[in-house]
Amino acid sequence: MAAKYAQIMIWVKFSDFRYALHRQLFKKEYFLLRTQMLARHNKEIEQAQRIHQAEEEDLIRTLNLDRKKLPKILRLEAKTRSNMFKESLRISAQVTFLYFYKGNDINNARHAK
């Protein structure tokens, strides 16, 4: 009976040791995975921040170029609108001239007959 009891005690101690060892191994694996995941997460965040920073710098560069070009574009558009307006006035004056002066000569010639 004492031998059985001693055997059971040895088995219990061995089971406790196995359980503690298993728990310690599990904790180590968990912390290793957690560390690896955090490192990967930090790398991904840094990469996303670099990409975002590059895009932001590109947008700022484009905006500054557009700001420099804007006055020239506005001047060219104003000049174009002015030329179009002058051309429309010239066409309008020609039409008016043809309508009143040439048309009256034709009408006068008709009435004179």
Image: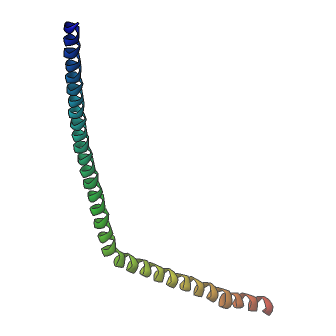
Residue at image coords 20%, 33% = 28
Q: Nearer the viewer, residue 79 or 66?
A: 66
87 sits to left or right of 67 = right
Residue at image coords 30%, 56% = 52
Q: Is residue 13 above or below residue 7?
A: below
Q: Is residue 96 above or below residue 3?
A: below
Tell me which corner region of the image, top left, top right, bottom left or bottom right, holds residue 3: top left
Q: How is the image coloured?
A: rainbow
Q: Is residue 112 above or below residue 49?
A: below
Residue at image coords 24%, 51% = 46
Q: Quadrant of the N terminus?
A: top left
Q: Quadrant of the C terminus?
A: bottom right
66 sits to left or right of 27 = right
Place of residue 55 in the rendered image (x, y in percent of width and height, measured from the top left): 30, 58
Q: In the rendered image, is residue 66 in sight?
A: yes
The tally of labels here is: 0
Place of residue 39 in the rendered image (x, y in percent of width and height, measured from the top left): 22, 44
Residue at image coords 55%, 82% = 88
103 sits to left or right of 43 = right
Residue furthest front in the image? 1
Place of residue 33 in the rendered image (x, y in percent of width and height, measured from the top left): 24, 36
Q: Nearer the viewer, residue 2 or 47?
A: 2
73 sits to left or right of 82 = left
Q: Nearer the viewer, residue 23 or 70?
A: 23
Q: Nearer the viewer, residue 86 or 57?
A: 57
Q: Is residue 67 above or below residue 32?
A: below
Tell me which corner region of the image, top left, top right, bottom left or bottom right, holds residue 8: top left
Q: In the rendered image, is residue 113 in sight?
A: no
Place of residue 24 in the rendered image (x, y in percent of width and height, measured from the top left): 20, 31
